[in-house]
Amino acid sequence: MPMTTPQIDLLPLVEAVHSATGRKIHLSTVLRWCMAGRSGHRLESWILGGRRMTTTEAVIRFIDATTQSRTPRGFKDEPKASTDKQRAERIRRAEKALQEQGI
């Protein structure tokens, strides 16, 4: 019984990165990501006909993994909520500015 493997769209390294990000990255950089890795993660790649290839999906997974490992713990994209004291100070300054303008 022949073994079936899922079809994946292999692309040359630089082409896969460009397809995933829209940026042109030098071949030596992408090779380094495959061979040595970055931030403890390596870009998945395969050799086909003597040429190293990868997929757009593998590039996206690599970028996500390296981004997460380099993002400080507890870091959130949303701004930190202000304390009651900070909020009260902003209100006081706003009220003072309104009084000075006669509003």
Image (tube, rainbow, N blue to C red):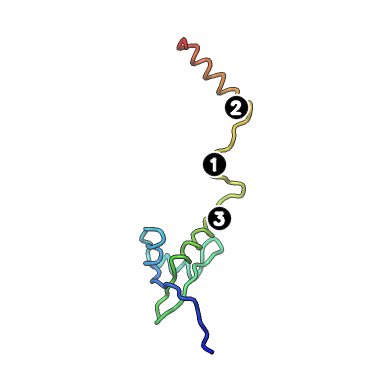
Type of residue at label 3? Gln
Residue 67: percent from left, percent from top: 52, 55
Q: Which mark is residue 13?
A: none
* For marks 1 and 3 on the same chain, the one whose residue lies earlier in the sequence: 3
Type of residue at label 1? Glu
Residue 52: percent from left, percent from top: 42, 75
Q: Secondary structure at mark 3?
A: helix
Which residue is painted at 57% across and 18% down in the image? 92
Q: Residues within 10 Å of mark 2 (few under 14, many from 20)?
A: few
The residue where tag 1 is placed is 78
Q: How many marks?
A: 3
The residue where tag 3 is placed is 68
Q: Secondary structure at mark 1?
A: loop
| 37 shown above or below 75 | below
Residue 8: percent from left, percent from top: 45, 73
Q: Secondary structure at mark 2?
A: helix
Type of residue at label 2? Gln
Q: Residues within 10 Å of mark 1 (few under 14, many from 20)?
A: few
Which residue is painted at 60% across and 27% down in the image? 86
* For marks 2 and 1 on the same chain, the one whose residue lies earlier in the sequence: 1
Residue furthest to the top: 102
Distance of label 3 from label 2 (alpha carbons): 31 Å
Mark 1 or mark 3: which is in front? Answer: 1
Camera-side residue: 52 or 55? 55
Residue furthest to the right: 84
The residue where tag 2 is placed is 86
